[in-house]
């Protein structure tokens, strides 16, 4: 594993690499490939049987264009943390042999290729994170199991539609980030089954059609970002009942209709982004009830009238005041 992640020892890890002349280490006994037990090496944790359970090498200068197949031999591995490195390999199919794996962090690297179908063998998976890479292909339908809570694949080149199994087999999902890909089709009403969901980012894709009311089924939903798609129609009434929302970003779509006065019911809202749509009518004065609001953008719509005094009187954020200065008579409250 060490030689595979140092380009055959041509490179060196940032910390506790095998070559002491190129890599510092707070404790020499924990240096990789030292004579000490591997359970004492930096980034490794073992159970009572000296079986490796954790491999944590986040932001440590790992490089290389292939991941060793031998990684699949770590049958007791529960946590694989390789985030924020420079790995440019495919994800090996042997990763599907890690039957005890719960947390897989491969995000913020340069991984390529597809998600191996063998990932469907990992029924104990709680977190799957491959965001900010250069991966592609479709999402394997068999990878969704009941233990999965965090699903992060943002900023890659994935395409196709979301598997129906996501909404039938992983009902405990809390955080979903699929933004910055090329997914298409309408937004599934199956989101209504995910009643524990707290965060949903699906921005910067190719979704079309309406924003389904089912997306607001979770009473815990705090973040919804559907910006930069091709969504249309009016906003569903159920939106205004999602009173746990803190971030609502629907910018750069083709939504129509008016903005309901019930938006004032979203009392926890901190960020509101509705710019670059086709909304019409006036800005509701009830936005003035959103005392936690720090950012609001409704530009590039067909809104008319004046900025309500109740909005101009908000005292929550100097940033918000500055953006509204010209609409509030040019002076700050």
Image (spheres, grey):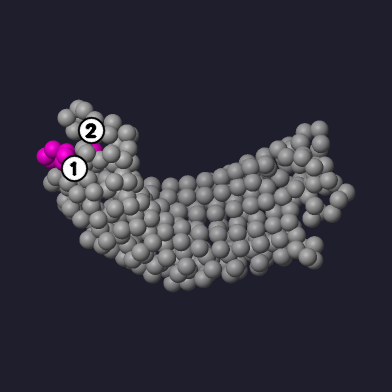
Q: Which residue is mark 1?
A: 310
Q: Of all residues shown, which one is farthest toward the left?
A: 305
Q: Name the residue rendered at 60%, 59% in the picture.
A: 103
Q: Name the residue rendered at 66%, 62% in the picture.
A: 78
Q: Nearer the viewer, residue 210 or 53?
A: 53
Residue 332's place in the image compared with 85, above or below, is above
Direction from residue 234 to residue 15 in the image, left or right: right
Q: Of all residues shown, which one is farthest toward the top?
A: 330
**Residue 121 appears at what percent x and percent y?**
60, 68
User: Is residue 303 shown in magenta?
Assistant: yes
Residue 2's place in the image compared with 94, above or below, is above
Q: Name the residue rendered at 46%, 58% in the picture.
A: 175
**Magenta span: chief secondary structure:** loop
The crowd level at tag 1 (other Cα within 10 Å; few <14, some 14-19, many 20+) is some
| Snapshot quadrant of residue 147 | bottom right
Mark 2 near mark 1, Cβ–Cβ under 8 Å?
no
Measured in 3D between alpha carbons, the distance from the residue under mark 2 to the one under mark 1, in whole angstroms, is: 11 Å
**Residue 222 appears at what percent x and percent y?**
38, 55
Direction from residue 133 to residue 181 in the image, left or right: left
- Residue range in magenta is 299-310
Q: Nearer the viewer, residue 102 or 111?
A: 102
**Residue 109 appears at what percent x and percent y?**
59, 44
Direction from residue 50 to residue 212 in the image, left or right: left
Label 1: which secondary element: helix
* Residue 333 tag number: 2
User: Is residue 195 shown in magenta?
Assistant: no
């Amino acid at each position: 594993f060490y030689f595979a992640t140092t380009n055959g020892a041509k490179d060196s890890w940032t910390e506790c690499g095998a070559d002491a002349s190129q890599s510092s280490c707070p404790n020499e006994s924990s240096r990789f490939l030292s004579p000490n037990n591997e359970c004492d090496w930096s980034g490794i944790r073992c159970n009572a049987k000296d079986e490796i359970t954790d491999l944590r090498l986040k932001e440590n200068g790992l490089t290389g264009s292939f991941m060793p197949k031998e990684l699949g031999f770590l049958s007791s591995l529960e946590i694989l943390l390789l985030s924020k490195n420079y790995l440019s390999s495919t994800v090996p199919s042997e990763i599907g042999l890690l039957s005890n794996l719960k947390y897989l962090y491969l995000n913020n690297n340069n991984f390529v290729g597809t998600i191996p179908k063998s990932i469907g063998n990992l029924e104990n998976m709680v977190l799957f994170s491959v965001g900010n890479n250069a991966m592609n292909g479709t999402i394997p339908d068999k990878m969704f199991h009941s233990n999965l809570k965090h699903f992060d694949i943002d900023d890659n080149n994935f395409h196709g539609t979301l598997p129906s199994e996501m909404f039938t087999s992983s009902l405990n999902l809390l955080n979903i980030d699929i933004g910055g890909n090329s997914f298409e089709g309408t937004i599934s009403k199956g989101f209504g089954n995910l009643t524990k969901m707290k965060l949903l980012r699906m921005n910067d894709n190719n979704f079309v059609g309406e924003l389904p009311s089912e997306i607001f089924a979770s009473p815990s939903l705090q973040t919804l970002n559907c910006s930069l798609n091709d969504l249309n129609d009016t906003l569903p009434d159920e939106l205004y009942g999602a009173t746990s929302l803190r971030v609502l970003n629907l910018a750069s779509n083709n939504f129509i209709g008016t903005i309901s006065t019930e938006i004032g019911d979203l009392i926890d809202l901190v960020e509101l982004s509705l710019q670059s749509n086709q909304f019409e009518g006036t800005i509701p004065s009830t936005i003035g009830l959103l005392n936690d609001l720090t950012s609001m953008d409704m530009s590039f719509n067909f809104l008319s009238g004046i900025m309500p005094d109740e909005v101009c009187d908000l005292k929550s954020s100097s940033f918000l005041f500055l953006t509204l200065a010209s609409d509030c008579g040019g002076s700050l409250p």
